[in-house]
Image: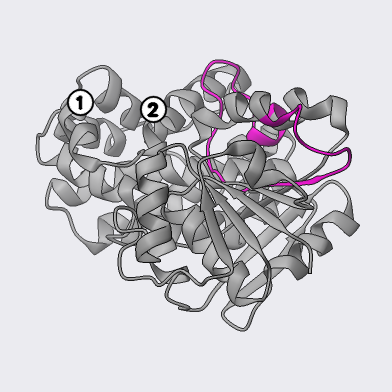
């Protein structure tokens, strides 16, 4: 079976390495921290990021980037979104032409507002890689313990998407395919923004009704931006849209929801991020999504109020009032327009 390199020894990278090793693949798991890597190889457990999950001997952890991708047919990128460009610059001289690059990070590049597959393509274009993404409702804590879920593999070429589907598909990890890279990637990034907002509502002591409203209207504004950017609106009704949004907004495995809860309780953002110990992707994604809403002229009220709370010190309760008392409108504007109600 083909060798696989997983770049990023955090919780998600470790969970994917475990999944692939259980399928019989030889997996090289790369991480920057040599002490963490040594500990992982000794204990056969990622004590810091994924405690309690046994790492099969088919996984070899290394802090040597060149060693990790040597002979690998598939390279899985599982580092935080803001590290993707830097990592691609480091591996461009090490990979073979037409290697399959599978991105599993969820986010947007804050400065350029580009999707991560666009960043990867820019940095690795000289090697003509086959770029794919893997996204969906998939907390590492559950995937590492063989708790069933379903995700989506996306790529411009159907053959590549189906190859990635075959690579990851297992009795506990079902993989669908979808050609809509724009929708898949925007869904994966924007759901973290809505999860932060939902967490803030939880921190304020609001209830299930509030959460349901934020999730539902969150899907609406995710799809609105997605369509403006060229995505298929149906993608946001699938696993990488509503599916990932539901799990991220409701689970305590979600760093974005946990961070939002603390912000809603009045803890300053800097203190929240310092206490988390892991990257909260939704913070940078909120800044990028807010900028994209301006670029495309698309109203995104939940994203806008979340941005004001995170970056302009607006009090969460004031943001809720402003969100609720906006100008009245129809729920589904297209339906009303088409029916001439």
- In the rendered structure, the answer to whether residue 314 lies left or right of residue 9 reads left
Give yes or no for residue 174 being in the magenta stretch.
no
Residue in the foreground of this view, choosing between 133 and 320:
133
Q: Residue at x 30, y 56 (%)?
A: 211
Secondary structure that dominates the magenta span? loop
Q: Which residues are magenta?
A: 91-119
Name the residue carrying label 1: 270
- In the rendered structure, the answer to whether residue 312 lies left or right of residue 87 reads left
SS at mark 2 in the image: helix
Q: Give how far apart the Cα atoms at labels 2 and 1 are.
A: 20 Å
Quadrant of residue 273 within the rendered picture = top left
Residue in the foreground of this view, choosing between 311 and 138:
138
CB under 8 Å between discs 2 and 1: no
Q: Residue at x 42, y 28 (%)?
A: 284
* Foreground: disc 2 or disc 1: 1
Q: In this rendering, is residue 229 above or below 166? A: above
Q: In this rendering, is residue 126 above or below 132? A: above
Whether residue 110 can be seen here:
yes
Residue in the foreground of this view, choosing between 1 and 265:
1
Quadrant of residue 86 within the rendered picture = top right
Quadrant of residue 123 within the rendered picture = top right
Q: Earlier in the sequence, mark 2 or mark 1?
A: 1
SS at mark 1 in the image: helix
- In the rendered structure, the answer to whether residue 97 lies left or right of residue 214 reads right
- Dot 2 crowding, Cα within 10 Å, few <14, some 14–19, many 20+: many
Q: Position of residue 70 (x, y in %)?
A: 73, 45
Name the residue carrying label 2: 304
Q: In this rendering, is residue 320 above or below 55? A: above
């Amino acid at each position: 079976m083909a060798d696989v390199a997983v770049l990023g020894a955090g919780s998600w990278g470790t969970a994917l390495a475990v999944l692939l090793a259980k399928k019989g693949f030889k997996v090289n798991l790369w991480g920057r921290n040599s002490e963490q890597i040594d500990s992982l190889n000794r204990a056969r457990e990622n004590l810091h990021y994924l405690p309690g999950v046994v790492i099969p001997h088919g996984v070899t952890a290394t802090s040597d980037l060149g060693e990790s991708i040597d002979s690998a047919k598939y390279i899985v990128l599982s580092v935080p979104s803001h590290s993707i460009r830097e990592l691609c610059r480091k591996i461009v001289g090490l990979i073979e032409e037409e290697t399959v690059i599978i991105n599993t990070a969820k986010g947007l590049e804050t400065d350029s507002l580009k999707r991560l597959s666009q960043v990867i393509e820019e940095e690795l274009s000289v090697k003509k890689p086959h770029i794919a993404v893997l996204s969906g409702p998939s907390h590492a804590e559950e995937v590492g313990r063989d708790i069933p879920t379903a995700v989506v593999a996306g790529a411009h070429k159907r053959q590549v998407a189906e190859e990635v589907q075959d690579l990851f598909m297992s009795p506990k990890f079902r993989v669908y395919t979808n050609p809509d890279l724009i929708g898949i990637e925007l869904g994966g990034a924007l759901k973290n923004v809505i999860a932060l907002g939902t967490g803030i509502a939880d921190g304020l002591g609001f209830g299930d009704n509030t959460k349901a409203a934020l999730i539902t209207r969150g899907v609406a504004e995710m799809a609105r931006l997605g369509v403006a950017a060229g995505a298929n609106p149906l993608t946001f009704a699938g696993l990488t849209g509503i599916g990932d949004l539901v799990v991220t907004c409701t689970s305590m495995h979600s760093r974005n929801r946990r961070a939002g809860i603390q912000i809603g309780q009045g803890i300053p953002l800097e203190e929240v991020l310092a206490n988390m110990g892991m990257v909260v992707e939704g913070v940078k994604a909120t800044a990028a999504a807010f900028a994209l809403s301006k670029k495309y002229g698309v109203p995104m009220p939940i994203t806008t109020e979340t941005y004001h709370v995170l970056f302009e010190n607006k009090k969460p309760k004031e943001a809720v009032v402003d969100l609720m008392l906006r100008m009245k409108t129809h729920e589904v504007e297209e339906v009303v327009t088409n029916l001439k109600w």
